[in-house]
Image (cartoon, rainbow, N blue to C red):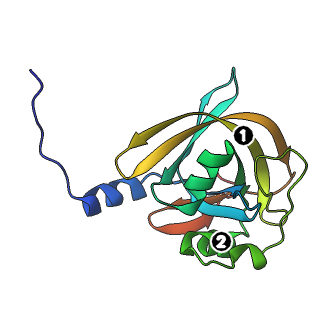
Amino acid sequence: MTQSLPAIEIAEFRTLMSHFPTGVAIITTTGQDDSPRGMTVSSVCSVTLSPPTLLVCLRNGSPTLDAVLARGAFAVNFLHGDAKPVAQLFASGAPDRFDLVPWRLPPRAGGPHLVQDAHAVADCNVSRTEAVGDHTVVFGQAFRVAREQGLLPLLYGMREYQVWRSDQG
């Protein structure tokens, strides 16, 4: 027999998770009209090396999730330490966000690459999805990776953006 446990409040869970700093990424793809779509996430996780798979959690009802599911591909733009304004812009849902940042869509890419704000990009094909509460977990099999050397990642924790310090360790 499974025991039913009381649920914790959303605010309490959000506070708990704020104590777990994580990298910041922008998930991008294109809509059926080829227009760019994207949103800031901090829920990115490697799943397996073979095949190279990661997961991202996207809010149900978001235009980005809808476009990722329709297209079956996306890009994960891992942001560098100077990209805090871009992280905030893509978290805001501003409809003109792609007009305010440089980006390009390489041939056969999973989605737009944020050329000045990402220190690494993984292009992925959707391999599986799982609806969980108010989000959908999207598993992506990486088929291409691009990296920029010498840039430190942007982190999010304790409800603040910070830059990874190279002297930590």
The answer to whether residue 2 is left or right of residue 126 is left
Residue 36, relative to residue 92: is it above or below?
Answer: above
- How crowded pointer 1 is (Cα within 10 Å; few <14, some 14-19, many 20+) is rated as many
Residue 80, relative to residue 69: is it above or below?
Answer: below
Query: Which of the two discs, 1 and 2, labels the residue nearer the N terminus?
Result: 2
* Foreground pick, 4 / 69: 69
Label placed on residue 124: 1
Amino acid on which the number 1 mark rests in the picture: Cys
Residue at the (89%, 52%) spot, across then down: 106
Is residue 55 visible in this depiction of the protein?
A: yes
Where is residue 159 shown, x and y percent of the image?
45, 67
Where, by quadrant of the figure, is residue 116 drawn?
A: bottom right
Residue at the (76%, 53%) spot, across then down: 111
Amino acid on which the number 2 mark rests in the picture: Lys
Q: Which residue is mark 2?
A: 84
Q: Secondary structure beneath disc 1?
A: strand
Residue 70, relative to residue 4: is it above or below?
Answer: below
Where is residue 16 shown, x and y percent of the image?
33, 54
Q: Secondary structure beneath disc 2?
A: helix
Where is residue 47 shown, x and y percent of the image?
58, 30
Where, by quadrant of the figure, is residue 32 drawn?
A: bottom right
Where, by quadrant of the figure, is residue 9 drawn?
A: bottom left
Alpha carbon separation for disc pair 1 and 2: 24 Å
**Image quarter hosting the N terminus:** top left
Residue at the (79%, 55%) spot, across then down: 119
